[in-house]
């Protein structure tokens, strides 16, 4: 966290130099806004479409650097390790259908989260199945705090064409939207009377799901979000400025039959950000020498619950650190060479999916796992449900080793890609369920109805997941605190002191 907070400002300045734009005040300084859960206005943005500016700046900078080779549709599925050190990586060239062995002494994973675990209750693309997490685990790295998944409270659930769209949340943040149950009650008064609808994501999600579970939800499994208490002209002015032509980041509500000037909207929580991930140090280095991680695939920076506004800047800070460290490690590690016999074994694991003539269907395995995750490992958890989830998910993970891909065409075989993703998803699903079952308390985004209080004497610990002989093992370690005074009276660790 020290490395992140120290280096985030300069990372944003670097992005701006690449061509990214941010809103500025009249005196030319960054416009900083107050986000839910924050004490001070500290989040910078570009008309609340900040991610697109990150993409714009980074894409432009990559284009200016001829020494960077970009491989499109290139799915890295595993890391080769020799003597505890990275020797290379195995990738599927999706277009050709061929597996490619890449010799390298350093690998950086920046593969994002695992929100697809809760599909269709998620707001991410369907390829965020925990692929980097699972590959790192198979290579010998450790995962930490995998029970902590953040849910965004206001994803649309109706109409089906807009299922999962979260941009409607701007009506809550910036237009003063109110949340109602089916009886017309502003139920946030029961859960957070001081902040009401501007409560934190975890508290708001918990409140919404509780209303649904207790029978006070809307017809399609959500609750109501409405701004109709405002004047029609007020709503129109907000729409014109923020979402011209009613286009919510490409989704036109009017065309879908929703008019926020007159209608309440059915919403429910969706998986949004993964606090758990691959365990790393301040250098973004893992337990496997030469394997580095950056961004949402990592664990540690956000603890049990990320506050809003940290995710994008985290990618830039850790990406710079991981890239620099990996380059320096590779320069001193010498030439790496993957063992041919090991490569054949790894390729065989995935080729067998196509070669089999019978076996489980990957889509059926994935769909069942996602249903289990939402029902038992979602926003609201309890011991009985988690026990059921762990048992069934372990069974599904075992079945996944015999997946049969029906499509036998090598080139652009989407079913093969999804089968590999499903194998990874099941590793992450069982890991999360096991860690959630073991943590008999409520902390951050992890809410146990049967253990509703935070329990520091027993559970101020990190959950550590390892994989050995195909078995997922879990242990706990005390949280290692490093207290820093505002004046810096205590010297931080040397590796965190270094500038980007």
Image: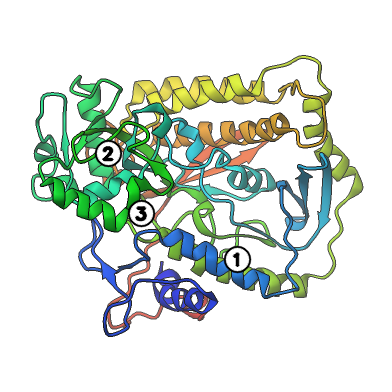
Rendering quarter of residue 255: top left
Spatial distance from mark 3 to mark 1, Cα to Cα?
A: 27 Å
Q: Looking at this rendering, what residue extends furthest in the right direction? A: 340
Q: Report which residue position mark 2 lands on.
A: 205
User: Counting residues from the N terminus, which is met first, the one under dot 3 or under dot 1?
Assistant: 1
Q: Position of residue 197 (x, y in %)?
A: 17, 45
Q: Report which residue position mark 3 lands on.
A: 306
Q: Is mark 2 on a helix, strand or loop?
A: helix
Q: Do the residues labelled 2 and 1 touch (CB within 8 Å)?
A: no
Spatial distance from mark 2 to mark 1, Cα to Cα?
A: 34 Å
Q: Which residue corresponds to the image point at 32% horizontal and 74% vertical from the top-left?
A: 484
Q: Which residue corresponds to the image point at 31% horizontal and 44% vertical from the top-left?
A: 168
Check residue 59 in the rendering and tell me which mark sits there, or answer none: 1
Q: For label 1, count other residues whose C-alpha is less than 10 Å away and answer few (under 14), some (14-19) or many (20+).
A: some
Q: Can residue 148 be seen in this view?
A: no
Rendering quarter of residue 163: top left
User: Counting residues from the N terminus, which is met first, the one under dot 2 or under dot 3?
Assistant: 2
| Viewer-side residue, 260 vs 357 | 260
């Amino acid at each position: 966290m020290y490395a992140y907070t120290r280096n985030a400002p300069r990372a944003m300045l670097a992005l701006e130099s690449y061509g990214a734009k941010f809103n500025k005040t009249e005196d030319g300084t960054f416009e900083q806004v107050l986000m839910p859960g924050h004490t001070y206005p500290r989040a910078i943005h570009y008309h609340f479409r900040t991610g697109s500016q990150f993409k714009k700046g980074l894409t432009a900078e990559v284009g200016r650097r001829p020494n960077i080779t970009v491989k499109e549709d290139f799915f890295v599925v595993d890391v080769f390790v020799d003597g505890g050190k990275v020797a290379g990586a195995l990738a599927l060239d999706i277009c050709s259908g061929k597996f490619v062995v890449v010799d390298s002494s350093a690998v950086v994973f920046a593969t994002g989260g695992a929100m697809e675990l809760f599909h269709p209750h998620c707001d991410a693309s369907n390829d965020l199945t925990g692929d980097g997490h699972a590959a790192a685990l198979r290579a010998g790295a450790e995962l930490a705090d995998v029970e902590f998944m953040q849910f965004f409270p206001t994803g649309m659930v109706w109409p089906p064409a807009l299922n999962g769209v979260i941009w409607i949340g701007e009506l809550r943040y910036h237009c003063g939207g109110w949340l109602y149950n089916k009886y017309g009650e502003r139920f946030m008064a029961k859960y957070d009377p001081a902040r009401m609808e501007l409560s934190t994501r975890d508290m708001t999600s918990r409140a919404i799901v509780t209303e649904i579970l207790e029978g006070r939800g809307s017809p399609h499994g959500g609750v109501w979000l409405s701004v109709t208490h405002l004047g029609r002209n007020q709503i129109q002015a907000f729409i014109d400025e923020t979402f011209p032509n009613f286009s919510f980041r490409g989704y036109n509500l009017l065309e879908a039959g929703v008019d926020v000037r007159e209608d309440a909207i059915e919403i429910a929580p969706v998986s949004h950000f993964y606090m758990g991930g691959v365990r790393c140090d301040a250098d973004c280095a893992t337990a496997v020498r030469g394997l580095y991680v950056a961004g949402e695939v990592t664990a540690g920076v956000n603890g049990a619950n990320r506050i809003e506004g940290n995710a994008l800047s985290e990618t830039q800070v850790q990406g710079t650190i991981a890239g620099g460290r990996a380059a320096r490690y590779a320069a001193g590690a010498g030439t790496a060479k993957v063992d041919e016999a090991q490569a054949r074994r790894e390729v065989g694991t995935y080729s067998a999916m196509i070669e089999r003539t019978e076996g489980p269907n990957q889509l059926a395995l994935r769909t069942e796992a996602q249903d289990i995750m939402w029902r038992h490992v979602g926003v609201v958890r309890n011991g009985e449900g988690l026990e059921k989830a762990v048992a069934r998910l372990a069974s599904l993970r075992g079945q996944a080793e015999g997946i049969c891909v029906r499509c036998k065409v090598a080139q652009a075989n989407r079913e093969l890609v999804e089968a590999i993703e499903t194998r990874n998803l099941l590793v992450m699903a069982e890991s999360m369920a096991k860690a959630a079952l073991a943590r008999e308390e409520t902390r951050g985004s992890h809410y146990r109805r049967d253990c509703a209080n935070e329990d520091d004497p027993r559970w101020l610990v990190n959950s550590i997941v390892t994989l050995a002989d195909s078995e997922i093992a879990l242990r706990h370690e005390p949280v290692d605190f490093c207290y820093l005074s505002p004046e810096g009276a205590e010297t931080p660790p040397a590796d965190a002191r270094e500038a980007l």
